[in-house]
């Protein structure tokens, strides 16, 4: 692995990516405060359009009733949600702009304050941008009732729909590993029928993953000669990271936290611990199994022969397999999660490159009376296979010093070549890409644009709007989209502060390359 700079040496501009002159050494308080305001706006907006099950007693709360069940209240909440989300994006951009010396203690404190100030209020939101947490609760009930969640959908639980679970999961097995099923069972056993307490406990589980990223990302960055504070700003302080892992309560926080911790442990020559941590990550969501071959290469060491590399990869796989087999034996579910991986295998989305290509193929062929969607399925499969081919290439080709970067790119290939890309899939990539170096050129500008786009999509797509109002779901989405798009265009073209970061000459003023 790449070694950290010698003790006592401050990373240089070439290694940190901090090359553009800034007006201040630390951010102005207004940047942090505006982000806090945006986060608080999400809290209030969630009262009207956050995901709230029909059986929740909060529906009878006198504060929530006018926000959720009146046209004026819903419109206000949509506006608050949209403006709050975009304020977080602007505050994040300004935070990065205003830090002149990333290596200073003041800069590090400022980024940590931003993470706390922006993230803490989100723990009080009604779940936003996703209702997966209610599916976690329903799956926990399946476990508590002694059923096999890989065989028995959440519809086997009486009144599951009133508990907030998406009907998508009514008969579908959960694409989660044994560790997360145990977490679901434990939380439901503890909280009983109290949905709000269950949500808070799942947020605490996500907090474990967030804290692991907060701890490990700077350490991985130092190993690669990258400034740890800048890496934290790009990843953990990113509004997509905070909203998806706190407001949306995605279990991906725990998954990626365990994975980066395992990768770091292996990089500092504690391979068994690293394998166990990454296997625990697989036990949450199996996608991180892609990291295991790279752990084997790290364990084999620099300059190892290919027989040695293959041998250590095999040992890594056997250790992980044994742990997962033991977990399957203990919970009586075996490797049922393997069959569940196809749960979301046939879905696609228009903004994913492969999903868009499949849509184009289907549209053209359907126009000629041919089986367009059958062809689209072939395109989707080809995209997935291309992703795995890239993973294989990254495993076989590249410098040992860039193994963690190669592992990050392998996960990125799985995401980019998939027909379905959710916002939290992109967040999986942030910790490792930021820690291994993100250049101050098209790379960071692309991240800015992706962050803005996915925030617009989040505030637009997932709204829980009471159906018997003058404002229906489509109108609410259109309102949120107009606000988000207008705010983004303002940031890119009109804002006298942030518009500069979207211009190439801003970075060319002093750009240097990271690794």
Image (cartoon, helix red, strand yellow):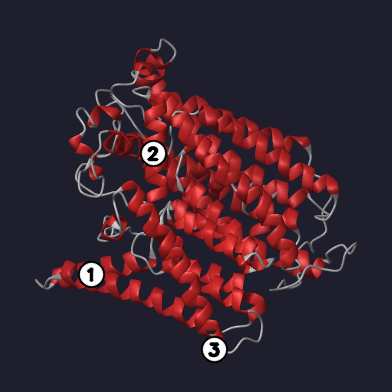
Q: Is residue 282 visible?
A: yes
Residue 282 locus on image (x, y percent): 44, 57
Residue 471 locus on image (x, y percent): 31, 28
Picture layout, residue 430 above or below residue 86: below
Mark toward the start of the polypeptide (2 vs 1): 2
Residue visible at 68% across and 74% down in the picture: 1
- Residue 270 got which mark? none
Residue at the spot of label 1: 376
Picture layout, residue 206 above or below residue 326: above
Residue 325 locus on image (x, y percent): 37, 59
Residue 145 placement, left or right of 62: left
Q: In front: 386, or 24? A: 386
Q: In front: 235, or 172? A: 172
Residue at the spot of label 3: 306
Q: Is mark 2 on a helix, strand or loop?
A: helix
- Please identify the residue farthest to the top as the structure is shown: 62
Labels 2, 1: front one:
2
**Disc 3 residue crowd, few under 14, some 14–19, many 20+, Cα 10 Å:** few
- Residue 184 got which mark? 2
Q: How many labels does the image show?
A: 3
């Amino acid at each position: 692995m790449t070694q950290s700079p010698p003790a006592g040496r401050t990373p240089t501009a070439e290694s940190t990516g901090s090359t553009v002159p800034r007006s201040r050494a630390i951010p102005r308080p207004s940047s942090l405060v505006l982000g806090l305001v945006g986060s608080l706006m999400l809290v209030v907006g969630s009262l009207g359009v956050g995901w709230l099950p029909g059986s929740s007693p909060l529906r009878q709360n006198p504060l929530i009733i006018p926000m959720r069940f009146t046209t004026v209240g819903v419109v206000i909440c949509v506006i608050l949600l949209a403006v709050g989300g975009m304020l977080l994006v602007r505050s994040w951009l300004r935070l990065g702009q205003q830090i002149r010396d990333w290596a200073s203690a003041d800069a590090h404190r400022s980024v940590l304050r931003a993470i706390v100030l922006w993230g803490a209020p989100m723990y009080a939101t009604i779940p936003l941008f996703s209702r997966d947490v209610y599916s976690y609760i329903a799956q926990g009930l399946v476990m508590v009732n002694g059923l096999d969640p890989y065989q028995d959908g959440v519809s086997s639980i009486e009144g599951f729909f009133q508990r907030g679970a998406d009907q998508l999961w009514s008969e579908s097995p959960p694409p989660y590993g044994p560790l997360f099923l145990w977490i679901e069972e434990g939380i439901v056993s503890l909280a009983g029928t109290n949905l709000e307490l269950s949500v808070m406990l799942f947020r605490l589980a996500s907090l474990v993953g967030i804290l692991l990223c907060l701890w490990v990302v700077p350490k991985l960055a130092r190993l690669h000669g990258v400034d740890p504070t800048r890496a934290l700003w790009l990843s953990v302080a990113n509004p997509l990271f905070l909203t998806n892992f706190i407001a949306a309560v995605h279990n991906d926080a725990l998954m990626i936290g365990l994975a980066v911790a395992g990768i770091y442990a292996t990089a500092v020559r504690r391979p068994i611990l690293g394998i166990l941590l990454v296997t625990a990550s697989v036990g949450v969501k199996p996608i991180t199994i892609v990291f295991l071959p790279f752990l084997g290469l790290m364990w084999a060491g620099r300059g190892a022969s290919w027989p040695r590399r293959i041998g250590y990869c095999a040992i890594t796989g056997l250790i992980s397999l044994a742990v997962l087999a033991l977990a399957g034996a203990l919970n009586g579910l075996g490797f049922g999660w393997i069959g569940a991986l196809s749960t979301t295998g046939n879905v696609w989305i228009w903004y994913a490159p492969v999903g868009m290509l499949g849509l184009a193929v289907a549209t053209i062929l359907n126009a000629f009376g041919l089986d367009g969607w059958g062809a689209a399925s072939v395109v989707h499969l080809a995209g997935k296979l291309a992703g795995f081919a890239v993973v294989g290439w990254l495993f076989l080709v590249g410098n040992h010093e860039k193994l963690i970067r190669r592992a990050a790119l392998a996960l990125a290939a799985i995401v980019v070549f998939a027909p379905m890309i959710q916002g939290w899939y992109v967040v999986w990539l942030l910790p490792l890409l930021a820690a291994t170096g993100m250049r101050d050129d098209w790379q960071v500008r692309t991240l800015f644009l992706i962050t803005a786009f996915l925030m617009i999509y989040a505030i637009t797509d997932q709204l829980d709007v009471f159906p018997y109002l003058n404002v229906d779901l489509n109108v609410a989405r259109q309102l949120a989209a107009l606000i988000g798009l207008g705010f983004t265009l303002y940031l890119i073209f009109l804002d006298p502060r942030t518009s500069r970061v979207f211009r190439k000459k801003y970075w060319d003023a002093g750009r240097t390359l990271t690794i």
